[in-house]
Amino acid sequence: MRKLILGSALGLCFSLTTFASSFSVTVLPGTMTNLFSFSANLGSVLAKQFIATATTGTNFTAAVVDTPTNLLQYTQSAYTNTTRYATNGVLVWTNFYGVLQSNNMVGGTLLTNWWLVDVTNNLVSATTNSYPVRLYVGAPANGSSTYGPVSGQVNGYYFDQGIWVTNTGSGVGTLTVVY
């Protein structure tokens, strides 16, 4: 009985640690396809390997983009921020008797007055930014290429928003991600 329980436990451990998940999509020329979507609470996904396969007699090239939708750019809306600074303020005026007075003189003693100034009309204009392309892949006609972690990248490629593939060439191809 012990051997059965021990064997079952070891088998379960090996099955949980040795298999990786993968997903494949076919990408037509000039199109963009969702390879992997994220749920709102998933966080980052570590893609350990990409396999590009040209399914026709034409070379297949594609860009793998970290984006939540099929758009390659996003716009950061315009916003207003508040700038705050301190300055030394001195008021000088002439009193009723024609004597020059200042707000930093009390009984002949020079005082320093600090004023806090808020500038709330600092408008920051809208900007257009591009989602990051994590890597470019390609495969020769009727062939395939494998892309793993590059030198200095121990684990693979991290994606924070979603994995989308855009076919940048003229050939039909299949892209597989192992995560």
Image (cartoon, rainbow, N blue to C red):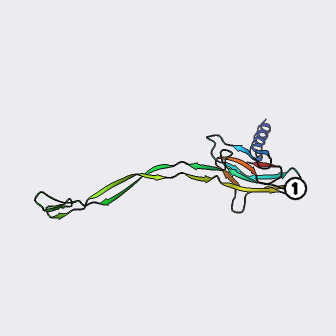
Q: Is residue 47 above or below residue 4?
A: below
Residue pictured at 67% horizontal, 52% vertical? 158
- The front one of 17 and 7 is 17
Residue 115 appears in the picture as rendered = yes
Q: Give the class, few, some or many, for how many residues have Cα within 10 Å of label 1's Cα (few <14, many ≥20).
A: some
Amino acid type shown at disc 1 = Ala
- Front residue of 125 and 102: 125
Quadrant in the picture for residue 6: top right
Please tell me how many numbered marks the rendered image carries.
Answer: 1
| Residue 107 appears left or right of 116 | left
* Residue drawn at the location 61% of the way across and 41% of the way down: 41
Place of residue 119 in the rendered image (x, y in percent of width and height, measured from the top left)? 38, 53
Viewer-closest of 97 and 40 = 97
* Residue 147 can be seen, yes or no: no
Q: Is residue 140 above or below residue 75?
A: below
Residue extending furthest toward the top: 1
Extreme left residue here? 97
* Residue positioned 77% across, 43% down in the render: 15
Secondary element under disc 1, as helix, strand or loop, is loop
Task: Indicate the position of residue 106 as horizontal and vertical percent values.
Answer: 16, 60
Q: Quadrant of the N terminus?
A: top right
Residue under numbered circle 1: 141
Q: Is residue 36 above or below residue 114?
A: above
Write down the quadrant of residue 92 in the picture. bottom left
Image spot of residue 167 (x, y percent): 77, 51
Q: Where does residue 77 sit, x and y in percent of width and height?
A: 54, 48
